[in-house]
Amino acid sequence: MEPPMEPSGGEQEPGAVRLLDLPWEDVLLPHVLNWVPLRQLLRLQRVSRAFRALVQLHLARLRRFDAAQVGPQIPRAALARLLRDAEGLQELALDPCHEWLSDDDLVPVLARNPQLRSVALACCGQLSRRALGALAEGCPRLQRLSLAHCDWVDGLALRGLADRCPALEELDLTACRQLKDEAIVYLAQRRGPSLRSLSLAVNANVGDTAVQELARNCPKLEHLDLTGCLRVGSDADFGRVLPVAAVTASAALPPCGRAQPEPLAEAWCGHRRGTAPAPGPGATPGHGRLRTLCQPAGLTDCPSGAQLDCVVGA
């Protein structure tokens, strides 16, 4: 039997209430543990068996899990212990596990959490099409997905995602270099009406055909990253295809530390909502809020004529 815990001053004062005496379900879990950082909770569970049971109950009720809150590197066994009872996750970020995360580690977690709405798997190069298939098949409410720098993502994997995730709104495919225009066209045709944010950066296989199809099928698109897509812009008329655009180039490093190519030009043409002029003749309707990220060389003006907030930087 667990010995009674005493206050730090020595003997327990008459009438005093210990922390663990408070109602767990009604007080401690929703109003105390929810505000304690995950790393501190892991230390707390070492205090006693009672605290360990409380923390495990909290972990089983998690709605959001970000491995970065545990530390820059988390062992496989630790992740398995943390998520073994979680069945209500809505957000899952496993980017810090990119060096070892495999299908066998991820698929059981996805199977227990079908209500996931946001998943981040950037740089997780040990995964395969099997994991993405399990995500698409088992999580129909998925809205946000990051697969940046996942070299294994190909056209077939993206097709499965487009077919089975009707709620998809934000998708990061940065440096998924196996993807070509055909896969992006299929994505636009299947999920275009719901897409709000898409990154195709650092992919020399993406060209004007994909951009034009996105413009035709994505009326809600607000953010499109084409940094490093060197085939884009040779034939596309951005003034017509993307009538209201913001243009920039980004050299940020991904979580795994892989450098992106240096931009050809670094600029930001920020479009202020509600202040842009009306789209020109032939412009695709419904794109008044679109922000486009790309890197055209020698950029001097916004393709749409929208007000230029910040011009080319060094």
Image: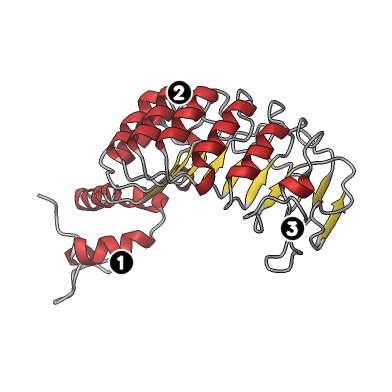
Q: Toward the viewer: 147 or 204? A: 204
Residue 247 lies, in percent from the top left, at: 76, 50
Residue drawn at point x = 70 percent, y = 42 percent: 252
Q: Secondary structure under badge 2?
A: helix
Q: Quadrant of residue 202?
A: top right
Does the image show residue 248?
no
Q: Report the mark closest to the observer, 3 or 1.
A: 3
| Alpha carbon separation for disc pair 2 and 1 | 40 Å
- Disc with the residue nearer the chain's start (2 vs 1): 1
Instruction: Confirm or deny contact between disc 2 and disc 1 (CB under 8 A).
Output: no
Please give left or right for residue 58 compared with residue 301 in the image: left
Q: Quadrant of residue 134?
A: top left
Residue that numbered label 2 is attached to: 129
| Alpha carbon separation for disc pair 3 and 2 | 40 Å
Rendering colour mode? secondary structure
Does the image show residue 90?
yes
Mark linked to residue 153: none
Q: Report the mark closest to the observer, 3 or 2.
A: 3
Q: Amino acid at mark 3?
A: Pro
Q: Secondary structure under badge 1?
A: helix
Residue that numbered label 3 is attached to: 279
Q: Amino acid at mark 1?
A: His
- Disc with the residue nearer the chain's start (3 vs 1): 1
